[in-house]
Image (cartoon, rainbow, N blue to C red):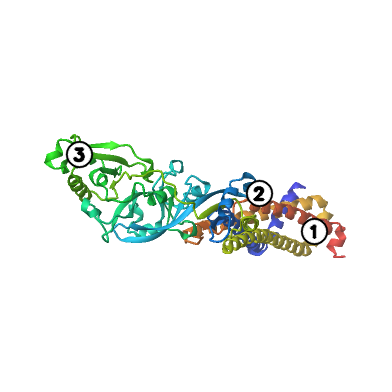
């Protein structure tokens, strides 16, 4: 009997597959369409989930109004943990907004918009410095970020506009310090009133919230307003007399070369030694070294000649590119508290409560949140929900198509071979054995189709990035490997077994004679 079943399996497999395996190829095509639908659904949902959890999307900007709003009371209320839990925001902070002049590589001055954050060690900042947003790994480690830094985070597009390129990202960015008259102390002025004041670059990123050009710390903003020590005014003798340098790790003989640049009168007393880095001037290039240059002659500060320092600085600037060797200044910073910040940044965990939060701020504090922010975030949330529903609808529809194909294929096939079924039964082959043969055949055919369809879909998924077909230039449109794919495969096998059993059980309930003579 086993020999009959083996022969039956081989012969019936050819018939089930159809001429030139047409049924197999049709099933593969249907499965490819199914898996591409699932992969597209997975890719879209992955993209939406990324965007839904993206602080750039979940970040709400609140501006202080000029009416009777209770902005400060809202600021205090946001610190309440119960309010935070109720409306689902991760953190918040106070911000200042200001536009500053920045010098490019060729000393061209550009006007840039900057947001000054109260805190630089937040989840929002972690997201800004995430690997997918940072350009060429140019970012200070987040555990080294300090609220007492003078540094900036700048977008790569603006860095290019300043004359820099991907392979020449500097450690410092020149802030245009308003210092008219400082040329009398040896500083080179631009437009007769600006001096290049190096500020550390904390990171270079692809994008910043609200299309800002720069992000800085509130510490810089407070020192910009500091009228006690005027740290960014270069009409200061100590700035002109003192020589401090940041030196890239690629420069190995800095001290020896500098000593040859000193005038003969102080060459034997010149000291070039490493200095301790200061937190407020720490840049993304943490592997650079800091140097101080001075004479060990006992000369009072007020009697030191700034001309000597200026001459050495000019020679150093001519010898090394400022990308590798940069003169810096230990700015005369001091404690200074600016006025209350006119902006609040609220970083939400999700967008579900954004409308409720907007109503809370308006009704309790008369603080208006720009409706375009609320509407766009609500719309984004609605799109995410609809996409999830459509995702499952596509999968269900694809599964129904496959089942209909299998049912129609079996019914059409069994109508043609029902006389053979009757003959098999007449020779003593039981209905359960016949069902078992056809279940095995269909499972093998479905398995082969699934493997082929998965391989083709995966190949398409791999080829899309090669041809540059990506969402936002980053996200793949397809993502085949997921729980949904596994679930669909399991359902296909179960549905195939049930379909074969139901169709054949109904057919084999008839006697051999009825099947042979079509009674």
Q: Position of residue 492 (x, y in %)?
A: 70, 54
Q: Position of residue 90 (x, y in %)?
A: 58, 48
* Cα–Cα span, label 1 and label 3: 91 Å
| Distance from the alpha carbon under mark 1 to that under mark 2 | 56 Å
Q: Give the residue number, with chain letter if any, for mark 2.
A: 86
SS under mark 2 = helix
Q: Earlier in the sequence, mark 3 or mark 2?
A: 2
Mark 3 Cα within 10 Å, few/some/many (few <14, many 20+)?
few
Residue assigned mark 1 = 503
- Say which quadrant the C terminus sits in: bottom right
Q: CA distance from mark 3 to mark 2?
A: 63 Å
In terms of image quadrants, where is residue 43?
A: bottom right
Seen in the image, is 255 located left or right of residue 351?
left
Residue 115 appears left or right of 391: left
Tag 3 residue: 256
Furthest toward the left, the residue is: 264
Marks 3, 2: nearer the viewer? 2
């Amino acid at each position: 009997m086993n020999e009959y079943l083996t022969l039956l399996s081989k012969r019936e497999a050819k018939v089930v597959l159809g001429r030139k395996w047409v049924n197999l190829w049709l099933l593969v095509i249907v499965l490819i369409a199914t898996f591409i639908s699932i992969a597209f659904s997975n890719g879209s949902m992955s993209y939406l989930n990324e965007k839904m959890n993206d602080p750039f999307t979940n970040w709400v900007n609140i501006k202080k109004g000029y009416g009777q709003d209770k902005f400060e009371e809202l600021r205090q209320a946001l610190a309440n943990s119960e309010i935070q839990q109720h409306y689902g925001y991760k953190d918040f902070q106070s911000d200042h907004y200001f536009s500053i002049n920045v010098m490019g590589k060729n000393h061209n001055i550009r006007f840039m918009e900057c947001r000054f954050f109260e805190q630089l060690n937040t989840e929002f900042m972690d997201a800004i410095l995430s690997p997918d947003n940072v350009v060429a790994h140019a970012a200070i480690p987040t555990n080294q970020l300090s609220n007492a830094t003078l540094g900036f985070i700048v977008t790569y597009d603006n860095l290019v506009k300043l004359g820099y390129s991907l392979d020449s990202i500097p450690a410092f960015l020149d802030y245009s310090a308003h210092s008219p008259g400082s040329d009398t102390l040896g500083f080179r002025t631009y437009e007769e009133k600006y001096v290049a004041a190096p500020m550390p670059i904390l990171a270079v990123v692809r994008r910043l919230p609200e299309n800002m050009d720069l992000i800085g710390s509130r510490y810089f903003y407070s020192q910009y307003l500091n009228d006690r020590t005027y740290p960014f005014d270069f009409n200061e003798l100590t700035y002109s007399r003192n020589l401090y340098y940041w030196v890239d790790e690629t420069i190995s003989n800095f001290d020896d070369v500098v000593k040859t640049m000193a005038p003969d009168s102080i060459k034997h007393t010149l000291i070039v030694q490493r200095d301790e880095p200061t937190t407020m001037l720490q840049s993304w290039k943490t592997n650079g070294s800091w140097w101080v240059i001075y004479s060990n002659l006992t000369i009072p500060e007020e009697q030191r000649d700034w001309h000597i320092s200026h001459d050495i600085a000019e020679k150093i600037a001519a010898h090394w590119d400022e990308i590798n060797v940069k003169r810096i200044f230990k700015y005369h910073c001091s404690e200074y508290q600016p006025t209350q910040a006119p902006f609040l940044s609220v970083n939400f965990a999700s967008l579900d409560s954004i409308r409720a939060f907007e109503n809370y701020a308006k009704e309790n504090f008369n603080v208006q949140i720009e409706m375009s922010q609320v509407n766009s975030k609500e719309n984004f949330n609605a799109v995410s929900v609809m996409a999830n529903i459509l995702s499952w609808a596509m999968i269900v529809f694809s599964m129904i198509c496959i089942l209909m194909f299998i049912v129609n294929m079996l019914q059409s096939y069994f109508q043609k071979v029902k006389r053979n079924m009757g003959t098999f039964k007449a020779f003593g082959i039981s209905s359960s054995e016949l069902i078992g043969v056809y279940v095995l055949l269909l499972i093998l055919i479905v398995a082969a189709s699934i493997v082929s369809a998965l391989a083709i879909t995966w190949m398409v998924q791999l080829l899309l990035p090669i041809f540059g077909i990506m969402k936002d230039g980053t996200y793949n449109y397809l993502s085949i490997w997921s729980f949904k794919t596994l679930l669909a495969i399991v359902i296909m096998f179960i549905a195939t077994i049930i379909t074969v059993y139901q169709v054949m059980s109904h057919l084999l309930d008839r006697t051999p004679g009825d099947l042979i003579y079509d009674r």
